[in-house]
Image: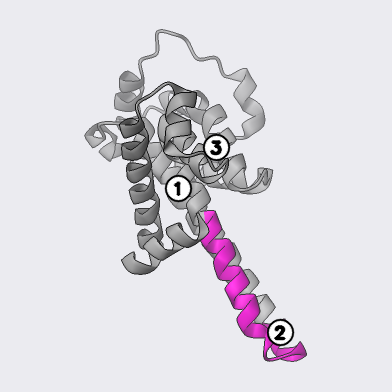
Amino acid sequence: MYISSHRISNLVIKKEHNESDLIEAIADGDEKAFKTLYTLYFKKLHKFLLKVTHNNEDAASDILQESFLRVWLNRDRLKEIDNFQAWIYKVVSTEALTLIRKELHIKTKADRLQSNIENENSTFCIQQSVEFTEIKSIINVAVQGLAQQRQTIYLLSREEGLSPDQIAKKLNISINTVYNTLTTALKLIRQELVNAGYSEYLSILIILGIF
């Protein structure tokens, strides 16, 4: 079920297409409906993956293809999904993490071999650097998968260094909304770290220490 990205511009989505109808048709094996749904989500998912992979076009395309292959292979279960958009973003995020961990695993082996040859003491530093990169990547994927308001508030807090009060004034929302949103965002990010194999305690330390 490979769909080349250069064909996307040739696919026209009619306004009368209802997403739930498309999903129902896909569940029944309709390939045309599958291609239409792919086109419907291609642009925003591709943009999301470019952010996650730091503009690695090949990686983004591979992840997207693998994700929609999973959609097609599990099409008989699509009718059980209440929120397809949330589900497909979760699928894409999982595929992205799998690719990132695979690439980091390969890089770790290569770096470890080189460090053993040059200087045994450098191995620890390299491993630490690779692990830090992995953690950053996991958190980046988690942040990109947040709802828009959560992502905005999180980035204003962590990247721009704004206080909850400043964020509330900037976005014209209550400070309680800011606190609640940040709490939820951090819980979701922490859960992604736990899912990736980090302990609950270590995940909390990572968030507090790095972000």
Q: Is residue 20 shown in magenta?
A: no
Q: Is residue 203 left or right of residue 46?
A: left
Query: Which residues fall within the magenta stretch?
Result: 113-137
Q: Which residue is mark 3?
A: 48
Amino acid bearing label 2: Ser
- Identify the amino acid type marked 3: Phe
Amino acid marked by disc 1: Ala
- Determine the residue positioned at 69% across, 84% down: 122
Q: Secondary structure at mark 3?
A: helix
Q: Is residue 161 visible?
A: yes
Secondary structure found at label 1: helix
Q: Quadrant of residue 131?
A: bottom right
Depth order, front residue of 211/41 = 211
Query: Of label 1 and label 2, which has the lower sequence position?
Result: 2
Query: Within the magenta stretch, is there residue 117?
Result: yes
**Mark earlier in primary sequence (3, 2):** 3
